[in-house]
């Protein structure tokens, strides 16, 4: 089960963190993985790391918020790989600031990156999947779309909208053979959450609050992704799979 041989996966935001772990996991299942980030040098390092594990990986640097550049990059790589079967739309950004002083330009920037840009690139890739009658689209949501938390107003708004988008796309793309789901990670130790895991008080609170008593690891998300990316998940669509050590299911 979950053999991805012969399939091609594009993972946005995969030069590190959850995306890189996802690329590794999909690659180990046999997929050709196209990894992405904004920094070509960092991306090339990540590609070499994957290649050293026997994974067929291509580096595709682009900024997801530059829609024209992103679409052009995907069209260019499609000439080589011919198709994209799996999209893990994962690149995301955070901005932490109190609501009452949160600058509007930062709100718009974070919502654009975490929602609008994903909609635009995802739709472009869905057109190719529609033409071939098959696709797996997985977005990265967040438990912050389910549980309120202070100082991340733009991020929360975008991720909550993303959860809604998943259900709408699933309804519309089912007839094209495309399933659409999201993974909502809890607290995962990556560069995005550096500020939090460097704070012993926060970690003590988290370890007490999460039933499984720990920070999540990028591989925890990658394992869930493999299931949603595989042919075998064919009857699962429009869902948000929460991977959070039980945090959102307990008080
Ligand atoms: N970590 C958590 O606890 C957590 C919890 C819930 C949800 N999430 C979500 O999980 C996803 C991955 O987060 P992470 O924790 O792995 O973050 P991360 O370690 O900061 O990695 C983010 C990745 O996205 C890339 N990226 C950022 N902006 C980009 C852009 N505009 N265009 C292309 N690539 C871009 C980064 O590379 P460059 O900077 O080089 O471009 C990097 O490869 C995000 O959607 C995040 O919101 C994370």
Image: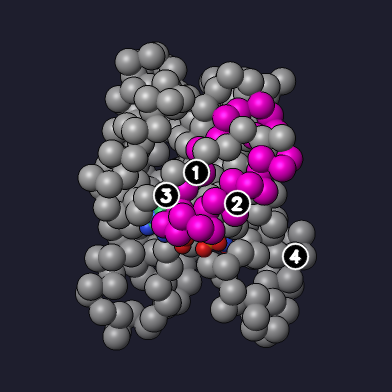
Residue drawn at 39 percent across, 39 percent down: 166
Q: Which residue is mark 4?
A: 214
Q: Earlier in the sequence, mark 3 or mark 4?
A: 3
Q: Which residue is mark 3?
A: 61
Q: Earlier in the sequence, mark 1 or mark 4?
A: 1
Mark 1 → mark 2, Cα distance in angstroms:
8 Å
Kindly indicate whether the residue at mark 1 contacts the one at mark 3 (C-beta within 8 angstroms): yes
Label 3: few (<14), some or many (≥20) within 10 Å? many
Q: Which of these two is toward me, 140 or 33?
A: 33
Residue drawn at 75 percent across, 65 percent down: 214
Kindly indicate whether the residue at mark 2 contacts the one at mark 1 (C-beta within 8 angstroms): yes
Mark 3 → mark 4, Cα distance in angstroms:
33 Å
Q: Which residue is mark 1?
A: 59
Q: Which of these two is toward me, 56 or 237?
A: 56
Taking the image as shown, residue 179 lies to the left or right of residue 28, namely left
| Residue 34 can be seen, yes or no | yes
Residue 98: image quadrant is: bottom left
Residue 159 place in picture, x, y as percent: 40, 55
| Residue 114 can be seen, yes or no | no
Residue 13 place in picture, x, y as percent: 48, 52
């Amino acid at each position: 089960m979950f053999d991805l041989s012969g399939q091609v996966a594009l993972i946005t935001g995969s030069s590190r963190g959850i995306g890189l772990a996802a690329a590794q996991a999909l690659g180990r299942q046999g997929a050709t993985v196209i990894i992405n980030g904004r920094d070509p040098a960092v991306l090339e390092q990540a590609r070499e790391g994957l290649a050293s594990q026997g994974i067929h990986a291509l580096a595709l640097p682009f900024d997801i918020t530059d829609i024209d550049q992103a679409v052009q990059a995907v069209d260019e790589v499609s000439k080589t790989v011919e198709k994209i079967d799996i999209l893990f739309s994962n690149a995301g950004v955070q901005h932490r600031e109190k609501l009452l002083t949160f600058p509007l330009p930062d709100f718009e920037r974070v919502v654009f990156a975490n929602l609008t840009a994903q909609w635009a690139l995802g739709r472009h890739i869905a057109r190719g999947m529609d033409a071939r009658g098959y696709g797996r689209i997985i977005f990265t949501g967040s438990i912050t779309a389910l549980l309120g938390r202070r100082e991340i107003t733009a991020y929360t708004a975008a991720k909550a909208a993303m959860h809604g988008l998943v259900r709408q796309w699933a309804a519309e793309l089912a007839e094209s053979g495309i399933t659409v789901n999201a993974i909502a990670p809890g607290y995962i130790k990556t560069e995005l959450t550096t500020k939090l895991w460097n704070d012993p008080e926060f970690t003590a609170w988290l370890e007490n609050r999460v039933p499984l008593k720990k920070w999540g690891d990028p591989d925890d998300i990658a394992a869930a992704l493999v299931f949603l990316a595989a042919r075998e998940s064919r009857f699962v669509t429009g869902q948000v799979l929460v991977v959070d050590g039980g945090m959102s299911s307990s008080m």
